[in-house]
Every structure is written in C-alpha cells, then in structure tokens.
Image (cartoon, grey):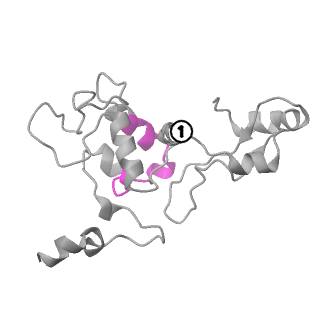
Amino acid sequence: MVVISQWEANKLKSLIASTQSVITLLAYLPRTSLSTRSLEDLKVYTVSPRSIIEMDRWVAPRSLVMQLNLFPGQLYLQDYDEYIRLCRYLGLLFTEKSSGDVTKSGFVGKRLGFVECEFETSPITFLSVVLKGIRRDGARIERTPMGRILAGEVLTHRDFPDEEGEMISEEDLMSDDDAMDI
C-alpha cells in the first residue's frame, strides 16, 4: 500500500480507471468524531479496473487498517477486539497492569509474547505528539479511546459500543453463571 494525498489521487484517478493495471485507488478518512461514520473498510470510494463484484468481495486486511488509522489521527476504535490488536501491535498491556517491567504508558514490547510488536521502546510519546499536533484548533483528545490509550489507561468492553452503537452494560458482559453469583 502507498498512501498519497488527495491532490495526487485526483491527478491519478483517470489514469488508474483507464488502465488494466492491478492498482486500486481507495479513499480514506480517519474517524475523529463519534458522529461520523467509520470509513476504514476503504470502500466508500474506489477507482479500480477490477469488477464491482470483485471489489465488493475485497476486505481490507485488519492489520493494514490498524496501521493506517494510527497516523492520520483516528481517535475511535471499532470494538474491543480492535483495541486488543492495537495494544499488541504497540506492545501495550490491555489488561490491568501487573507487577514487572511495565512503563507508565503500559509499554511492555515483546516481553509478554506480543510478537506483533516491532518497537524496542515505547511509541506512545511519538504517537501523542502526532495525534495532538494534527488536531484543529488545539482540540483535545484525552476523552477519546486513543487519548485514553496514549495516557496509559487500560480500556474494557464497556468502553466500546455494541453492534447497534449502544454502550455495553456490565450485566451484558456477565455470563449466566456469573449473573447467578450476584
């Protein structure tokens, strides 16, 4: 994947559409507000010599989308599973901090078996600078999931909406056996 600007995409759009190449142009916009729909499936606008049926079947690799979401300032994650994938990639604990060699940001790197993590040192300071630096008018990110992750907080299922967009209650998280113990 190569990331290009809107200007470059506009210049290349007709060339890509008219050739029989394997190049596909996909539009992306980070989700910076809960009121906006996520465009991370990369299907909102495509220019491709491939058929519509072929493009409908195509699914963006989750690891690619996760990396793409990091740098343009996406502040919201799809779900708890995406949170775990992100933490493993960044080398961050995603459960309550245990004793041991854990930084304030929750960085543990590969020490806990996070083979997805390629970082030798915590990437949190860098990501904080990037995400805070690209906000318009100094908008704050502390209350967003990414802001909380960058502050070293451990999130739970309750911090993410369910499939209907509703926040998950504690009762919904308990199994039937757990509910009987109350």
Q: Is residue 133 magenta?
A: yes
Where is residue 89, by image quadrant? top left
Query: Is residue 150 found left or right of 166 in the rendered image?
Result: left
User: Where, quadrant-wise, is the N terminus in this rendering?
Assistant: top right
**Residue at image location 25% in from the left, 75% down from the top:** 171
Work out whether residue 123 or residue 175 is closer to the camera in this orientation and state it.
175
Q: Say which element carries label 1.
A: helix
**Residue at image location 41% in from the left, 66% down from the top:** 161
**Residue at image location 80% in from the left, 50% down from the top:** 52
Neighbour tally class for label 1: few under 14, some 14-19, many 20 plus, Cα within 10 Å: some
Instruction: Answer yes or no: is residue 109 visible.
Output: yes
Q: Magenta stretch: give its range.
A: 127-146
Query: Is residue 155 found left or right of 65 in the rendered image?
Result: left
Work out whether residue 151 or residue 62 is closer to the camera in this orientation and state it.
62
Q: Residue furthest right?
A: 18
User: Where, quadrant-wise, is the C terminus in this rendering?
Assistant: bottom left
Query: Is residue 7 found left or right of 41 in the rendered image?
Result: right
Q: Which residue in the structure is indicated by mark 1?
A: 68
Across and down, in percent, residue 121 comes to 28, 24
Across and down, in percent, residue 159 comes to 33, 61
Where is residue 106, by image quadrant? top left
Identify the main secondary structure in magenta: helix
Where is residue 100, by image quadrant? top left
Across and down, in percent, residue 125 comes to 32, 33
